[in-house]
Amino acid sequence: MYIYRLILFLVFAGYLFSPVLMDWWGDSNGSWYRPYLVWAALIGISVWLEQKRKLDEL
Amino acid sequence: MNFSFSLGQIFAIGVGYLLVLFLCAYATERRWLPRKLTRHPVVYVLSLGVYASAWAVYGSVGLANQHGYGFLSYYLGVAGAFVLAPVLLIPILRITRTYQLSSLADLFAFRFRSRWIGSLVTVFMLMGAMPLLALQIQAVADSIYILTNEASPHTLALAFCLVITTFAILFGARHTSLREKHESLVVAIAFESIIKLILMLLIGGYALFEVFDGFQGLEIWLQDHSDQLQALQQPLEAGQWRTMLLLFFAAAVAMPHMFHIIFTENQSTEVLYRATWALPLYLLLLSLPVPLILWAGMAEGVSLQPEYMILGIGQEATHGLIGILVFVAGLSAASGTIILVTLALAAMTLNHLVLAAYQPGAKFDIYNWLLWFRRLLIGTIIIAAYLFYLTLGVKHDLASLGLTSFVGILQFLPGILAVLYWPTANRIGLIAGLCTGIGIWIFGQVIPLLYNLDQIAVPATNLVFQSGSDGWYQVALTSVTANIVVFIFTSLFIQPSEDEKEGASACSVDAMSRPHRLQLQARTCQDFVGFLAVPLGQNTAQREVDSALRSLKLSPDDGRPYALRRLRDRIQANLSGLMGPAIAQEIVDQYLPYQAGNSQSHSEDIHFVETRLENYRSQLTGLAKELDSLRRYHRQTLEYLPIGVCSLGNDREILMWNHAMEELTAISSKEVIGSRFDALPQPWQNLLGEFIQQQEQAHLFQKVIQDNGQPRWFSLHKAHIEEPLSHMDGSVILLEDHTDTQQLEEELVHSERLASIGRLAAGVAHEIGNPITGISSLVQNLKYETDNPEVIEETAEQILELTKRVSRIVHSLVSFAHAGRHTGQDQQEPMHICAAINEAVSLVSLSSKGKDIEFLNQCSSHIQVIGDIQKLIQVFVNLLSNARDASEAGDSVTITATLLENTVTVSVTDRGCGIPEAQLEHIFEPFFTTKEPGEGTGLGLALVYSIVEEHYGQIHIVSPADRMQGRGTQVNITLPLHHAEAKSESAWT
């Protein structure tokens, strides 16, 4: 459950700071697919957390 | 744009696609598709893709054109909700599965214990979903119109609505099994999601590789049109971005179709965990083509509105095909959303509006009635959505419609979070907050939408709500903030009712429901059928009870109060799935009531609470986990205690029956836990029942019972459990089995008795020998003196007397030898202590050693004790033998009795050499003897001690008895007096 509190914190922090993230991926020097890379990284973290949860509950 | 499609062709393609979809569902239902495939987690995850409605196909492109990367909020909001699944979705899933709740209205009505909440939420949900349904209808109608340029969009929309109504009924309301999961629907929606994804990727691929000639071409085009890239990258205003994320986050759980697919159609918690990353991945793939499609449309100079630009991309030769692909993708998204939203809303309306106003009663087949009403509602809702669409006209873009819907749905988010994390929230607060939020939403967004107003001023304030692309943001923030503030303050100032607290504890993440142990009026499962037949009819009642029994794996003969309470809960949950929680609650409260004036109304159902704790173990963390480990440790200690433990509630319901108890009684804990004490089989009911009734007696030693014809000895102990804070009063009983010890003791007594007889043998032979010699002499005399009849008569008398003496000796010996073998019956009864002593004296006197010792029995012949006379004879034989052995020839052994109020003390005093002080403390130990080898077994006094204790007496040895001379031993045995006699003999002392 601790790890879920961490997710809660991270998602809330992500929500608050997401406009900054938008500024970053809106940087004209960056690639157009930059937001998708961030998103893919988020999915990667979710997969990792899911694997970790499975191991914890074994 | 000119497309070369006729209306007939598009209609055929649309209906053909829907038929394929139906075929997919039908194949699942008929089990033509392997269950391994249809129940695969991927199917469930794909079905969650229903979230991507026509907005995802058309609206996203328009939103990307308007807000740049802001369009991603539609996908990221819902992805955020799924990343938070362990703290948001999983707890809701737990509640909905436990209590069979199938909609948000069910959840709120259950948590806040109010049918009005259910009705209000349903009405608001219908209002909130209408713009979303209108969006789907408009998207499909517009796309058909663009592709065919035939008929008016309104007519096309009506045709689409009629077709989709038919399919919605076919998918979700074809059978009477209204409550069960629609596996076929899930498979069909998953199929739709695959079609959507494939088509979007194909269109995106076409845009990339055909329109831009690959990545390099795209980069060159973007460099040439840097303004287009900058427009996409233009960041959305921070507040708007956050609000948009919040809207779509809320939609993931509050939208009726999302709630239905996430919770009602869920197969397992594990699958939902998998969706935490799989759904965001699906949405990423679905959103990836959006900017490409937008740029392709721009590159090709498509003249359509941005949201329908996707229909126009492609060269002359191919754009017809692309148009068809887009149409199918849009139809797929829109039909899936409409079908699911309508099914969910129809169920909510039926449960919370129709059934709240009218219930069909027992004369109808309730399943059929519900089915037909649901079909009617599906049609009504789709027609209502069409009328809403007609009222709006085609003057609004898809984004405005969608955002209006999402802002309305956002108003449910505070309530959802309160269900999980705020136990003191109450129904008045929720209603006040919802009404405030929805009121502002209607005023600020719905009215301007309906009347096409640019802005609307709030009366008596300076506040002006703008409509259009910026207005939604202002209305969303104002309405949800007002909603939250009113909700919190009203809840803080009004205390929740008791039933609301119960609802809160059932739903709260950190709390657990602690149901009370109440006695139901129904005593058997058949009573349940009888009681439920009144509102539901005999057949429905029987079906519901059978179904609940099956799911609980209970026998129809199980009459345990615990089982009946679980049956009631299950029936309530099942009826809740059928008719909504409010109606279900009313039916069980009215027809399956608890007994009135139940004094145990506050006793908690410990066994149930424990069972649930066991199930939720993996969810406990921190201190709760530590405490649970401690609880388990103590529980296991009791379970594995080698003494039988049985704990009873204050209503005499059995709460614990440990392993030792199972072994002792051969009754499994599963059979008795949760049952009334009176339901225990004999002889256990009598044994434990009589002991419990003896209020003042905390211990009962050596109680003998007949178990299957065999005698068994038990010691019982009990204690009262007082726990006023948690209302867990009751009692605990310990049961010790002494059968083995008792049997060993019996054997020991018998052995000792035989040993005593052995020691007496020589004396007996001598005793018998004397009269035999006498008889022999007398008979010889008779031989010679046959004349005198008087002599003959006198001799015969003497022979007779001597024979009687022999007979008496033999009788004493035989009865001593044979007595004492246990018969299983309690042989303790009132007996004269003096008689027992006399019998012992005569036995001991048989011994040759006893010849010179005088035994003086000074006890009153009236004193009575409760006891086994044979065992007490054994006691005195042993004591007198010891006294005789210690005495010298010519000594006397005195036996006296001192009477007290409730006891009598019998003292056996000799004038022998006494017992050394060092040996006194070992004197009662088995095999301890001071006699020569072969003289004594060392068991005599140990046996005396055991018998005296068995008679609830005490034994005490004083040596030397005569302190002046330092000689003699006195053995004092105190026994309980037989009280009736004691009163009549009180003058004796």
Image (tube, coloured by chain):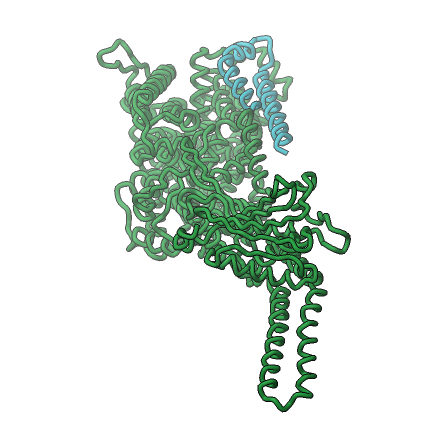
Q: Identify the residue shown where x is 58% and y is 86%.
A: B790
Q: Which residue of the protein is positioned furthest toward the left in this rendering?
A: B460
Measuring from the top left, give residue B506's x and y in whole percent. Answer: 42, 34
Q: Identify the residue shown where x is 48% and y is 59%.
A: B861
B479 on left or right of B882: left
Q: Is residue B562 visible?
A: no
Instruction: Determine whether B462 is above or below B35 in the image.
Output: above
In-front residue for pair B682/B586: B682
Q: Quadrant of residue B765?
A: bottom right
Measuring from the top left, give residue B219's x and y in whole percent. Answer: 61, 15
Measuring from the top left, give residue B18's x and y in whole percent. Answer: 46, 42
- The quarter of the rendered structure image containing the N terminus of chain B is top left
Q: Which chain is green?
A: B
Instruction: Determine whether B898 is above or below B435 in the image.
Output: below
Q: Is residue B936 visible?
A: yes
Q: Which chain is cyan?
A: A
In-front residue for pair B866/B280: B866
Q: Identify the residue shown where x is 49% and y is 19%.
A: B301
